[in-house]
Image: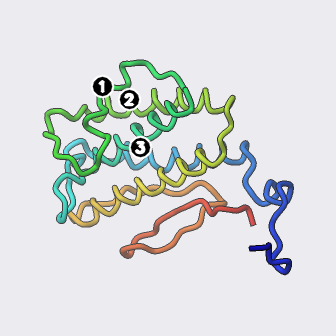
Amino acid sequence: MGKNKNHSYLSDLELEQVMYSYSVLVEEMEHARKYFLDHVYEIDEKDLFICSQSDSDQTIVRHIGYLGYFEKEAGKKLEIAFSYRMDVYDQIFCDLSDFVENKEIPSKENLIQFLEEIHNTFMDDLKFIKKSELLYTIINLHYAQAHEIRSLLKAKKQSLPDVQISSKTVLFRTQNHEKLYYLPMYTN
């Protein structure tokens, strides 16, 4: 089966020109991280355990912790060395659908500290590896987890955090009458 001569493919150089540069992705990561953490900071500790009506294990705290778990596991695949202390919550956050008792969940302060330590280790080592596709994925995971938090709060008729997006590149689509922000795949 031969190539269709009428179909043109992007050369590597053309692909580089439409994809985000690594430095732009690092800036976008800062915006996504701020947006996500602003949600976390504004949530009252008692609201961390608000759960989905359809799935009682889908709690806000699980969405927050899953982000840290995802960064850590992605980093391990890139041979980023994390302190063994960061494995302490793996059983709690590795699967968003497993049942976990509230007493096993860390306090909001410890959760934020856990997230920050993982994220800082991940980003410090990623600058040497420069995996743009992974960074792009994690940026959008930040927006997706913030959306899940907002959806859970809205479903329980809790006040939504008044958080503004700081990126000029990020777009949104409407999902469940709520804005779901995302970084588009290409720069144009």
Between circles 3 and 2, the one closer to the viewer is 3
Could you tell me how many numbered marks the image carries? 3
Residue topped by disc 2: 114
Sequence-wise, the earlier of marks 3 and 2 is 3
Q: Which of 118 and 130 is in front in this view?
A: 130
Kindly check if marks 2 and 1 are in contact, taking CB atoms under 8 A apart as contact: yes
Residue 169, x across and y down, in percent? 66, 60
- Relative placement, left or right, of 5 versus 47 is right
- The image quarter containing residue 94 is top left
Front one among 4 and 182: 4
* Mark 3 residue element: helix
Upstream in the sequence, badge 2 or badge 1? 1
* Res 18 quadrant in image: bottom right
| Tag 2: amino acid | Phe
Q: In which quarter of the image is the N terminus?
A: bottom right
Residue on which the image places disc 1: 88
**Badge 3 is on which residue?**
67
